[in-house]
Amino acid sequence: MAGAGAVGFPRELMVQRIQSLVEEGFWDALRRLKLDVLGTDDSPIPITGYYTPRQRRPMASFFNLRSGSLVPPSHNSVGDRNNCPVPGTLINTNNMRGFQNLDRVQLLKAEAKKILQDIVSGKVEEDPSVLLRFLVTSFADLKNWKVYYNVAFPSLVFNSRMTLLSLQPASKVLTKEEAASMHTSLQKWRASSETTVIPFFLVSISSDSSASIRQLKDWKACQGNYQKLLFGFYDHGCRSDFPGWVIRNYVAFLSIRWKIEKVQFFCYREYKGNPDLEQSLIGEASFPSPCGWDDPDFLPDAIGWEGINPGKGTKEMKPKEIDLQSMNPASQDEEKQLMHLKLMGWRHFPVNIDKLSHVRVLLLGAGTLGCEVARLLMTWGVRKLTVVDSNSVATSDLVKQSLYIDKDCGVPRVTAIVPHLKERCPAVDVEGIQMEIPVPGHPVSSSKMASVLDDCKHLQTLVAANDAVFLLTDKWESRWLPTLLCASENKIAISAVLGCDSYLVMRHGAGPGTSGGADEVITQIVNLSTEDALGHQRLGCCFCNDAASLINPIPYGTLPGLTSVASGKAVELFARMLHHPDEIHAPGDTAGMETEHQLGLLPHQLRGSLPKCVLSMELSNSSVNCTACSVAVLSEYRRRGLDFVMQAISYPTYLKDFTGISDLKRPDTCPKIPASISVNSDKISDVRCLLLGAGTLGCDVARILMDCGVRKLTVVDSGRVVVSNLARQSLYTSDDRGAPKATAILRHLVERCPSVDAQGIRMEIPMPGHPVSPGEAAGVLQDCERLKELVASHDAVFLLTDTRESRWLPTLLCTNENKIAITAALGYDSYLVMRHGAGPGISCEASSVATATDKLSTEDALGRQRLGCYFCNDVIAPVDSVSNRTLDQQCTVTRPGLASIASGRTADLFTRMLHHPDGIHALGEIAGTSSGHDHGLLPHQMRGSLSQYNLLTLLGYSSSNCTACSNAVLSEYRRSGMDFVMQVINEPTYLEDLTGLTDLMKSTSYSQVEWVDETDEDDFFEV
């Protein structure tokens, strides 16, 4: 070797830091892994990075993470010359707070400890890449398609100085012969698939100037046999005065494992794929052996976070940020719309999205039920829809039929519905077909016979081409032919039928199996079984209880919330059926049955009544006299085809005579209450309603309130419309993307009801347990005052926000002002709808100020015990319930039909309360008790479950410890006003101290009482 100069030496060993280059594909792969597989699991993930020696002279090489990096190196390919696989660890937190609170110092030390253990155990000699271990911490914001992250390359910190004795380009240190031999050996090393991925190696130079490259595990064989021994490594750096970062852990390995205190090292760099000895470096360094590092419990100090200089703390370290919204924009919208279904699988049920997206659904009817069912099916992930209807959009339809707007009036529904569905879900494949469904008992003239027969054939083709059929028509008899065809084709059929105040939702049973026979054709016609293909007793269809002629009584009209309730139930029944292993053949579950399926029971029929607040599950088998699905009818249809259908159409008594039910009577399928219920239209149109929240609940409630006759609405919301909202939030379309909800909702309300007086206010509702900085205090106080004015100027307030704590201040203000307050809250598969009780009366005569603060009664102004509010059963004060939660909790993941059901119940509860003579002071009633009021029961709380299909009416009174409506809280609010509110916002425990909850918790033995945790998955369960 040639001599090396020593100018500027010795000096402290300085290194060039390594930089990461993380491809978008890596983060997109992490996003998919988190959403589809990991869910709430935030355990460390073994990953693979890729390291390479410097390739270009003016630039250092980057450490790469790619889309294939989310697996450990052992599962990866062997890599190649420019991609040396390196093991790493990814810690992806569930929320931003968790990411910010990571102890990065300890995390780095833990990774350094792994490196030290690999050194001590000898693993480095077998797999030198472990010296390059790296660490990534991240938070994947799935909702906003952003990722925040930091990368570290842990380096052991010596407790003594590492000294650089010399450093020169290799071409100046080596003789020409040595350089030529080393060049050749390096090319062979790099050309071999076995050695090119090994970033640390030995270079031995013999006395005849020949160089050879050896692996670290050959260390013992190299000792004493060569003139010179260089410790080589792939150097990512490009500087001539510094070696690369990885020399630090290499030195630690040499010192600890092999007890070396002085080495000559070789920083290998390349240019255009060949060894670059002019830029590669050879140097000499010395380092005293560290003390105590062989202790198994020793935890070494470490450095290595990108962007942090050695010796600096990590508190001020800022994360890198990457926005993934530019990736695959064509498919991104669809992924956003399906996110809520994937989030369901994090804690509840893995939705079969592929099955839902491919199922072909035929909707017969594009009216009130058809609009709502079509939208909810898209929310469930259904992407293939065919809609059949014969009518046009009428002005009176606009507030009832959720998809149509004023410009659709006079347009065929099947023409109007298609663009409205695609506005909400561009990926949906929807076809509208204008067609009258032929009905039995309605003779047609000879001139129309051919047209009717064509319609029968068309419907026959449609049923055969689809997997499921929804019967949503207004005329009862128009369901006969689809029912017959579905039974013959063994297709899923779901019926939803509306009465005036009650509904029926049911799934039809499977078609009959065959009882045997040699001739297949004869078997399909004659030998039909009373059981289905699986040997189960066939469930009935919607005509199985018919015992009279097929007629369609003129309806009285339906209560406004009824459609939403029935539609939600119909779609949920379909989704549950589709996820059952037996699908159409599944037996009917009854109330109280136990089921292990995550989606709960699968009933045959659901019957509900709004005024009675009841929901029942019924089970009935196929009737031998059924005019639509009996074996006799199906055999005749299969034998004669559409000739049989045309005979049923032309002769009103034919089906009765054929099935033998001429002398029987038909029970009323959907009982109706008299049409004489009085509605105070003036009172409804004049009532001023304040809706807090313009999301899934807010859209539905606002629309149903307009259907009820409400014409004065104010909507408050702070959010903007995003793609994932479109199918779930019934009023918004793709044109609203990025617009404030409070602004966008106004246009859609006016499109459906030009006479509505609607106002939108974009405002964040101040919340307890969300402390604000001094600079934010003035703005928050202004919002508090504004909300106070809004509550005071309205007659009723609907609490429809996502977070629990955002309902606290409105609840307090409503109680203080004695305003009607209605809360609707959603869990995953259950909901709560409740009316808050009236504010307190006064207990004695006194001065107005004293009365308003200190003399509050435990009763209301009518001397009745006050009903409770949303917070009355809480044992802790409302606090920040979002920041430290996982995405599925932050997004309030619910089954798609739940919001429609809850919204219908909410609007109905409000209208009954408004018509009650006692209004807000009305007593709470329980299902099963008689009500003297024409509009039916007026419960305090309604709790419903989709998994158990039950509906409970509950009654609770105001708690003396309530953090929102107790006299202690109201008195303090009346005494201190907004100073009190701001103290609650900034001091999370203040309310608990004020209301006595702190003392209550202290005095109660935790070993005997299991408190309800505020982070329960179903937000409202704490009410």
Image (cartoon, rainbow, N blue to C red):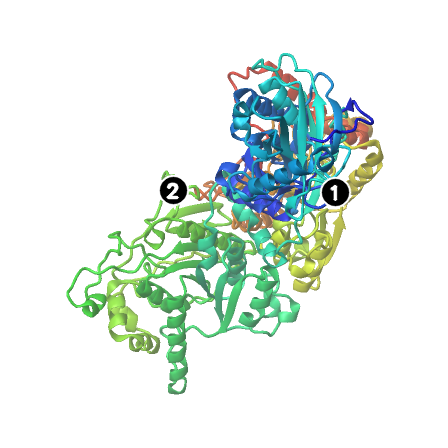
- Camera-side residue of 261 and 707: 261
- For this view, does 187 lie left or right of residue 370? right
Residue 971, position as x, y percentages in the image:
75, 27
Q: Residue at x 54, y 38 (%)?
A: 195
Residue 530, position as x, y percentages in the image:
23, 57
Q: Is residue 880 visible?
A: no
Dividing the image into 4 quarters, which one contains the C terminus? top right
State the residue position of label 2: 591
Residue 792, position as x, y percentages in the image:
76, 43
- Camera-side residue of 241 and 989: 241
Disc 2 residue type? Ala
- For this view, does 281 lie left or right of residue 124? right
As displayed, is residue 233 above or below residue 651? above
Q: Residue at x 61, y 15 (%)?
A: 293
Residue 885: name its quadrant. Answer: top right
Mark 1–mark 2 distance (CA, rounded to whole Å): 42 Å
- For this view, does 129 lie left or right of residue 507? right
Q: Earlier in the sequence, mark 1 or mark 2?
A: 2
- For this view, does 780 lie left or right of residue 412? right
Q: Please give the label number shown on residue 874.
A: none
Disc 1 residue type? Glu
Mark 1: which secondary structure?
loop
Q: Residue at x 52, y 48 (%)?
A: 341
Q: Are marks 1 and 2 in contact (CB under 8 Å)?
A: no
**What is the residue that sits farthest to the front in this orientation?**
208
State the residue position of label 1: 764
As displayed, is residue 325 above or below residue 966? below
Residue 92: name its quadrant. Answer: top right
- Camera-side residue of 779 and 979: 779
Mark 2: which secondary structure?
loop
The crowding category of the residue bearing disc 2, from other C-alpha atoms within 10 Å (few below 14, some 14 to 19, many at least 20), is some
